[in-house]
Image (cartoon, coloured by chain):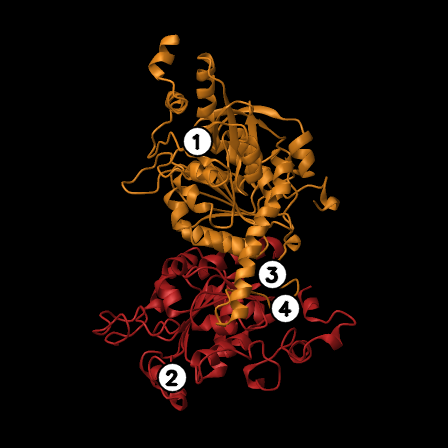
Chain colours: A red, B orange
Amino acid sequence: MSLDYVKFTPGFDTFMPKEYRDMVEHGPFGKKTTVSQMGSFKEILEEHPMCAGCAMTLFIRLAIVAFPNPEDTITVGTAGCGRLAISQAAIPFVYGNYGDQNGVASGLSRGLRIRFGDKPKDVVVMAGDGGTADIGFQQVLHSWFRKERFTTIMLDNEVYGNTGGQESGMTTRGAVLKMAPLGKKFEKMDMVAMAKIAGCAYIATVVPNNPRRVESCIKKAVLIAREVGPTYIQAYTSCNIEYAIPTDQVMADAKTVEDDRYKFAEYVSEDAKAYLAERYGYKEFVQKPVAAIATT
Amino acid sequence: MENTAIIGTKNKKGQVITDSRVMMNDAPRTASFFTGSEVIKEAVKRANVDIMVAYPITPQSEAAALCGELFAEGYIGDYFRGESEFAVMSQCAGSAFGGARVFTTTAGPGTMRAMENFPMWAGARLPIQCIVTCRGINSPLSIQPDTIEIAYLMNTGMLVWHAETAQDFYDWILKGYMVSEEPDVHLPLALCCDGFFVTHTKDVVDLTPEDMCLPPYDPYRSPVPCMDMECPPVRMMRDPFVMKSNYISYATHASWQQEVWAAAERSRKHTIAWLDGLIDVEDGDADILIISSGTAVSQGREAIRLLADEGVRVGLVKIKTLRPWPEEELREATKHASHIIVPEFNVIGWMAKEIKATIPNSERVVAGPRVCGGMTLPPEVIVEEVKKAIGMRSGVLAGRG
């Protein structure tokens, strides 16, 4: 029983650090918490070493709040800014090698299924644009083609932020960054189209300035990945340092980018729709009964 | 150490879960005639493996595919083909993080492509077993036998064993899991053999009964929690300590690396018990010794027979484990030797370097003969090296008949 391990061993509760006590007494484990309640419960991710005004951090917080079963969720990632925050969370984080997060998640998901059968153990990959579209590209695509059942979230800040601002495949054409001294020569990679071609059962593009939408997408993606197939969320999570976005304009930038190249889009496969409707009662995906043809 | 409650029960395939010492040491054996690749399959069949990840590369492709048959027959819980060796080893890591017993195979360039994973496996304390069927790695391309990749594996923190024969291979695959999974070890094992010489030749191998298997892996005996959200602590990160640039983070990382190597050292006692020592010595009192590992040992044994016919007495030391390295054993075994010949299947002579760094008076070590790139190592070449070392003209020896 997973929840047992978030309880205190009898007699030890008074000796536990306050942070730990708060997590057990006021954390989200075993409860239904939502982004609307943020501020009223102890979050799984609170302290982190990210830059002031980092949109990626806000997105990661929202994503973790949205996990349907945090007490049975394992996150996987790779090098990059996001990892610095995710690894501070109160749920496990696996770091393997550079860019191999979808390979590690494939094995982890399969290993947990062998050991726990139908009991849901959610595996969620969160990696940057470089980790997902560049160095991890092969393993990401192959995990999708193999129909590995876990969620992949790209934290797309359109740059290698953690290493100091180099061009990535997800950088927009023309952007002048380190290693692109004359501006990027090719278009931003269309990973959403590739996710669809590779057979992801759920795909969404989001920005962090709509918390409820982020929550809704993450929940659907994680639930669908339990049984139907791979799911992919691509989130614009700007790097205000490398793109010199003033801290107080980070959300305005997200809105501008949303209107430009990050319009909200959601693809749900027919199997995924049926699964969400039948298993989790998603009313919008309940098939409307076909009207009986009147015969006289 | 096994969970005794499950001994005598059956696994999903209906094999009887058997005390590993009973299975390996007491159970009746049946002599069978198999290639090394087929022997890998026979061992894995009895190893209660949860997940195997495969990828084709000569000369391990046949073994990796044969394990697929085991999956189809229900002996392995899950099996799939990865997209490259780097991906395969990452997939193996994920499976082991989730608490599964994991098996894989690779060779030569595959070993090199996967290399980033091996120190990660060791650092993450994942007791994965990887068969390495050694072959050439450098340009120009060669698929032929060559043991140079072992030199790289020896510095990863993994346990590294080097099988000479198919029988070694069979026994060591099974025993390897028992050593690797000990709580005070809990490290991955690179079980090496010389490609083609072992994988593609047939040999008589004594097999344990088909209806017996090893006890399953118990991930809760791991010294670090597996990532299944079933055991405390709530927050468990398997992540390098790069977030802090301070002395404590460096010290934490340094002490963990030391602990990984200490764990390999702690494997000695288990390995000595399972393999009956880290080295085998034949005629150890001889003034001249041939020391090596893998099939170079077999060639050395033939050379010793030829030399004996000519009245030259030579002893043999077979090194079974390269990590842990049998330091004390080698010092003891070479105490009286005046000449130490180290035949090898690689250009750099890593074995001779290791031996020179281990024993006193290392000028006794003859770093050769060495062949590479797929060349064979005829016993006569070793004979020549011995004669040269002791100042005997081979023509004269040949004349003596």
Q: For the residue marked with disc 1, what is the amino acid?
A: Val
Q: Position of residue A217 (x, y in %)?
A: 48, 75
Q: Are marks 2 and 3 in contact (CB under 8 Å)?
A: no
Residue under numbered circle 4: B234
Q: Is there a contact, CB below 8 Å, between mark 2 and mark 4? A: no
Position of residue B287 measured from the top left corner of the image (x, y, whole percent): 50, 23
**In-front residue for pair B139/A265:** B139
Q: Earlier in the sequence, mark 1 or mark 3?
A: 3
Up-down: is A117 above or below B61? below
What mark, if any, has residue B228 been given in the picture?
3
* Disc ID at residue B342: 1
Q: Is residue A26 in view? A: yes
Chain of residue at mark 4: B
Question: B395 and A251: which one is in front?
Answer: B395
Q: Quadrant of the N terminus of chain A?
A: bottom right
Q: CA distance from mark 1 to mark 4?
A: 52 Å
